[in-house]
Image (cartoon, rainbow, N blue to C red):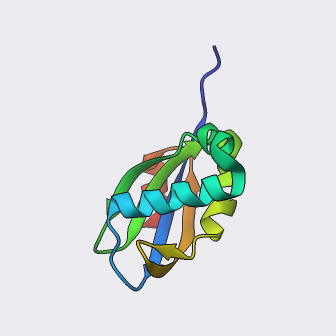
Amino acid sequence: MKRVKRRYLALQVDSDGVPSGKEFIDAVWGAVTKLYGEHGASLTSLALIDYDLEKKTAVVRTSLATLDLVRASLATITSVAGSEAAVHILAVSGTIKALHEKTL
């Protein structure tokens, strides 16, 4: 069986409010589902790895094969938890360690 390659995305959330980690990942899942449906969303293996409320940053894991799907979906997010928001991709990496080195 072939190993699944993953990619980690460092994200910046520009929002009027301060959404929780659950509200943020729900907005991401909603955007992916809206664009690609349930089947497309299930292929992404999307997971929230880290979320910082103070800095409004997040680290999300996805599969390499669906990286472009997730990037497109993140661009369509206009609200998180009922307040206007935008999500910006700061960096993409194959490991969390390299991702932290890129964003520092």
Residue 36 percent across, percent down from the top left:
70, 51
Location of the C terminus by quadrant is bottom left
Left or right: 19 in relation to 39: left
Q: Which x, y percent locates residue 25?
A: 44, 57
Q: Is residue 99 above or below residue 54?
A: above
Residue located at (67% from left, 48% from top) = 37
The foreground one among 103 and 48 is 48
Residue at x-position 36% and y-position 54%: 50
**Residue 7 lies in quadrant:** top right
58 lies left or right of 37:
left
Of 101 and 12, nearer the camera is 12
Taking the view exactly as shown, the residue that stands out farthest to the top is 1
Q: Quadrant of the N terminus?
A: top right
- Number of labels in the image equals 0
Q: Residue furthest bottom?
A: 16
Tell me: 12 left or right of 54.
right
What residue is rendered at 62% in x and 45% in y? Answer: 41
Residue 8 picture location, percent across and down: 52, 50
Residue 101 visible (yes or no): no
Q: Compared to 61, does 43 lie above or below?
A: above
Q: What residue is shown at x 63% (from left), y 44% (from top)?
A: 38
Could you tell me residue 2's position as x and y percent? 65, 19
| Residue 87 vs residue 102, the one in the foreground | 87
Asked if residue 99 can be seen in this view, the reply is yes
- Up/down of 6 relative to 28, above or below: above
